[in-house]
Amino acid sequence: RAKEKGRNDFQIFNSDMKSVSINRLKLENELRKALINEEFVLYYQPQVEIESGRIVGVEALIRWNHPDKGMVMPNHFIPLAEESGLIVPIGEWVLRAACKQNKTWQSEGYTPMPISVNLSMRQFFQHNLKGKISHVLEQTGLDPAYLELEITESMTMDVEHAILSLLELKALGVNVSIDDFGTGYSSLYYLKKFPIDKLKIDRSFVRDIMVDPNDAAIVATIIAMTHHLNLKVIAEGVETEDQLNFLYQNRCNEVQGYWYSPPVNRVELEHMLKNGIAAASAVSLAK
Ligand code: C2E
Ligand code: MG
Ligand code: MG
Ligand code: MG
């Protein structure tokens, strides 16, 4: 009996595995079609200078406008795209679309500001990444100073590769930031050796700064460190005025988060660029 049960378990497990892999295959095919049918869209989240309340940058975040499912969030397809390698052409689409949009904003007279693009692991390790990026910059006519590439700490584990790649990117004139900072295994020793411009403090630390003294200490320490290392810093996931105040008092210059705005579509972002952001400005901040 036990044997039979074991066998059944095995079969159930097996057929589950099968349906999982069928679903993955389906999703992978849909992703391929999505590229051809241009179903991806970019949303934009403002990055705000606390002191002035002004938008000083935007992060481009991909969405999949699926014909049946509606707007699909990146967490639902980026991991599979990464595994299957489709992230390379998808990432290239994001890069081109973001550069093109930023160039368009500039020619329409909006104050020039950098646009941040998330690079995936595969893209970062791709052969001739520098050539691909410089090609996109040439094609779109965007000044490299207005492109920022976000990498994560996990991409810097191979220190030699990371330093060489980052030097190549810096030679192009683009900016580089470390996204989700604090969640990986960056050694402080190497951090100072990496030619990067900015740290983005992960929102898991920001979330509890008002309730967890450890998180408050970590965030304050990261900010202080960036000033010593001459790096820029931005806090992600700022949702409340208290968090904003804490960050301001601890000399964090920029924030990104729902307090100011979630990621929005092009039209909504343009509205904010024209009219400013309706949220607390530095005036109301306790100094
Ligand atoms: P990320 O690069 O760290 O982007 C920030 C994410 O945090 C966004 O989620 C944004 O909507 C969310 N967020 C911003 N402010 C707040 C806040 O105040 N509270 C909360 N709870 N969340 C906030 P999104 O757009 O769903 O993107 C998730 C992740 O997917 C991104 O994290 C990034 O790792 C990845 N991703 C998005 N677009 C791309 C892309 O074009 N290429 C690649 N390779 N990855 C992408
Ligand atoms: Mg990011
Ligand atoms: Mg992040
Ligand atoms: Mg993240």
Image (spheres, rainbow, N blue to C red):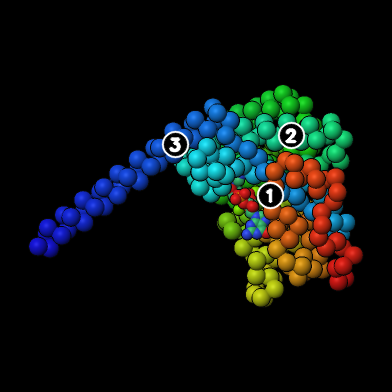
Of the residues under marks 2 and 3, which one precedes in the sequence?
3
Q: How many marks?
A: 3
Dot 3 corresponds to which residue? Answer: 28
Q: Could you tell me which residue is drawn at 81 percent across and 65 percent down?
A: 248
Tell me the quadrant of the picture where the C terminus can be found.
bottom right
| Residue at disc 3, CB closer than 8 Å to ligand 1 | no
Element marked by disc 2: helix
Q: Is residue 243 above or below residue 75?
A: below
Residue 153 in the figure: left or right of residue 262: left
Of the residues under marks 1 and 2, which one precedes in the sequence?
2
| Mark 2 Cα shell of 10 Å, populated few (<14), some (14-19), many (≥20) | some
Closer to the camera in the image, 178 or 143:
143
Rendered location of residue 153, percent (x, y): 60, 51
Q: CA distance from mark 2 to mark 3?
A: 27 Å
Rendered location of residue 108, percent (x, y): 84, 33
Q: Is residue 228 visible?
A: no
Q: CA distance from mark 1 to mark 3?
A: 25 Å
Rendered location of residue 98, percent (x, y): 70, 36
Rendered location of residue 215, percent (x, y): 65, 70
Q: Could you tell me which residue is drawn at 76 percent across and 36 percent down?
A: 102
Tell me the quadrant of the picture where the N terminus can be found.
bottom left
Element marked by disc 3: helix
Q: Is residue 42 visible?
A: yes
Q: Is residue 209 above or below residue 130?
A: below
Dot 1 corresponds to which residue? Answer: 263
Of the residues under marks 1 and 3, which one precedes in the sequence?
3
Dot 2 corresponds to which residue? Answer: 101
